[in-house]
Amino acid sequence: MNLPTLRQLEYIVAVAELGHFGHAAARCAVSQPALSRQIQEAEGLLGVTLFERTRPRTLVTPEAAPLIARARQILTLARELAEAAACTGKEPAGDVALAAIPTVGPYLLPGMLARWRDELPLARFIVSEQRTLPLLTALRTGQLDLGLLALPFEDEGLEVASLGFEPFVFVARDDHALLARERLQALALADEPLLLMEEGHCLGDQALEVCASAGAQARLDLRAASLGMLVCMVESGLGATLLPASALQREVMASSRVVARRFAAPPPGRELALAWRISSPRGPIFRRLAAGLRAHLAALLGAAEASN
């Protein structure tokens, strides 16, 4: 039996993801005619038409969808085979694709990436920002090696290393009545109109849970796409919000009108985690990275506590 090659599977998956032969050829660093020929050859070997060659977007045929899902799995296993060889008896080499959710990456990764480059000089970290659901999908399909995100999430097929608990902090403009208190009880938020992240950000969902338990009112008519915009909205007098403590130094300290107050114990918050596929041969290395992130988070939270 003649089988499609790994290269052909790579081309097929690229076209399926990008919906365009030209864009797929650019990603795979091959000419479009060569990519088209290889995919046609694979279709002949499989006896299945994989794509509807329409414009402006190429579509996956219904019968091809499960085959392309298997192709992704095969490519992931092939990459893990190469990674296992690279990890045998020496420091890890090659690309390490890491994605972080937007409310964690900008605050936890600075400083760590430079340290990892020093500790693992043969590895090349490729860093991106993604929301939780697409991040988990990319992690499971092998497009990512590591995910930096907040619990809870569906962890089937993943090894999850907890990095520690991060408290939320109440943030308001300096004329807000609740800022007169040294420490806040969560119930003090009752009837408080809180600004939240827009749908799709897990921080918004977590803040909604705090609102529900405290009787606070979420401002669903005003939602922010980033923590920076959330603080701008607070500074403009549109309402108060909750921020993760690690974001205080970058997002709040630079403002002359925005003030943070901590909650009395036990504060609301979230658990951060680093996740990777259980099947990854780089598991021991990723556990080392998780240990470094755990210590880094503790140091960041300690510094934020001392400055507020």
Image: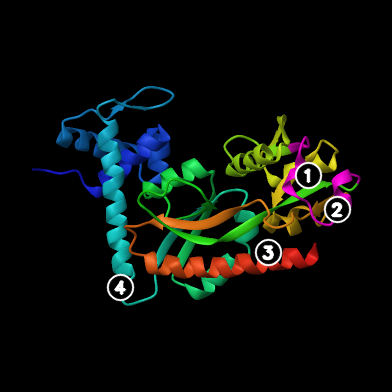
The residue that mark 1 highlights is: 188
Q: Quadrant of the N terminus?
A: top left
Instruction: Say which element carries label 3.
Output: helix
* Residue 88 numbered mark, or none: 4
Three-letter code for the amino acid on which mark 4 is drawn:
Thr
Q: Amino acid at mark 2?
A: Arg
Check whether the beta carbons of the residues at disc 2 and disc 1 lie within 8 A of each other.
Answer: yes
Q: Amino acid at mark 1?
A: Ala
Q: Nearer the viewer, residue 208 or 110?
A: 208
CA separation in Å, label 1 and label 3: 23 Å
Disc with the residue nearer the chain's start (2 vs 3): 2
- Does the magenta portion include 108? no
Q: Quadrant of the C terminus?
A: bottom right
Between disc 2 and disc 3, the foreground one is: 2
Using the image as rendered, state which of residue 251 and residue 122 is in the foreground: 251
How far apart marks 2 and 3 lie (CA) works out to 21 Å
Q: Which mark is residue 301?
A: 3
- Segment tinted magenta in the rendering: 175-194
The residue that mark 2 highlights is 181
